[in-house]
Amino acid sequence: MAYRYDLHKWEAAKAYAFGDVVRANPNRGNTLAFKCIGPGTTDTLDTYSEFEYDEPAFPFKITQTLVDGTCTWEAFEPLAEELLRLAPTAVIDLYEIVLTTAVNGTDAIIRYHPGKNGLTEEIKFDGNSYPAVPVEIDGFEFASNGTLPRPRLKVANVNNAITALILLYNPLAAKVQRIRTFAKFIDTVNFNQQVPFAPEEDIEDFLVTENNDPLIAQTFNDTSDPNAKMVETWYIDRVSAENPQFVEFELAPKIDLVNVGLPRRTIEEFCPWKYRGERCGYKGRSCFTVNDSTLSDSEKVIVNGVVINDICGKRVSSCQARFGRADTLPFGGFYGARLQA
């Protein structure tokens, strides 16, 4: 079963029955669906007015529950339902190579599919086109000894086209996304085709059985769902082979890239950002002591137009004093490094 967002959008103050399904706003990046396991009525919009996208904060983990008014929602993965079917539809692999000016010298997204499962035509998914390209990619298997996989992406080098491309643009560190879904979830437009081998003048006769029973020609996909997907992210680490026949790139997870040390920032409990700087982002007129107490105008010590005793304590509580208890704070430390007040 597919649960498209436009057909299963959450609504406020609405009565839901057991088994009803809703989806979170796709802009949140939540690919799970949520089944009603406790019938009732959802909360009002006023309840979620300060929430992102004016809807409940749906969980990101399977089987987690959420109480919404008198409703109870349970998270589940629609892809898992299809995978566990006795005869699931074909698995579709789609790939995106993301190039950026800062790293690769150009801004571009290259989309393609490798033509598996007998699919040699262009595939559309989530409104994007993925043409069939002569590409081989393998090595995604994880080993039991903990070694991270390093997949290999082999691209046909017809007329030295790929060689010329990598001379123009640096492919190293380009992001490669592997998108996996099922055929039933790809866009409706992929199925908008005429009935094959049917003469136009005899179409009515063509759509009947030998017993003159009418047939229904379904030329669309009513189970398309752009949120039903699994996304893996890799990065091009090096060019492992290059010849007139093909160019092979070796991929790696971000943690395993050459010359990249992790963590890029020291794990510490205090925020490293410069107070009132670009990453901090605080521009308020209120000033505070290092212990997060508000400074009155008489307590402010001003030198050259700067309140020199306006000091940030670099704690989560310091962020909360300045920004309030918002869902997202510009705190640059690590919440789990140490318990804080």
Image (cartoon, rainbow, N blue to C red):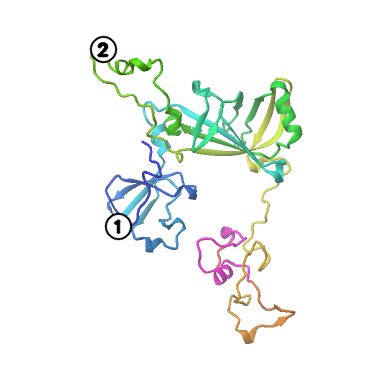
Residue in the picture at 32% in, 48% down:
36
Looking at the rendered image, the quarter that the N terminus falls into is: top left
Q: Is residue 318 magenta?
A: yes
Count numbered badges in the picture.
2
Q: Which mark is residue 130?
A: none
213 left or right, relative to 190 = left
Q: Mark 1 or mark 2, which has the lower sequence index?
A: 1
Q: Position of residue 287 (x, y in %)?
A: 62, 77
239 left or right, relative to 10 = right
Q: Quadrant of residue 78?
A: top left
Q: Position of residue 41 (x, y in %)?
A: 29, 56
Extent of the magenta region? 313-337
Q: Amino acid at mark 2?
A: Glu
In the image, residue 181 sits, relative to residue 307, either above or below, namely above
Residue in the picture at 53% in, 27% down:
122
Q: Is residue 312 magenta?
A: no
In the image, residue 190 sits, relative to residue 16, either above or below, namely above
Q: Is residue 98 visible?
A: no
> Which of the pair 98/335 is nearer the observer?
98
Residue underneath mark 2: 210
Q: Is residue 248 visible?
A: yes
In the structure shown, which secondary structural element does the residue marked by tag 1 occupy? loop
Q: Which mark is residue 70?
A: 1
Local crowd at mark 2 within 10 Å, few (<14), some, or many (≥20)?
A: few
Q: Position of residue 159 (x, y in %)?
A: 72, 21
Looking at the rendered image, the quarter that the C terminus falls into is: bottom right
Q: Amino acid at mark 1?
A: Thr
The outermost residue toward the bottom is 298
In the image, residue 201 sits, relative to residue 110, either above or below, namely above
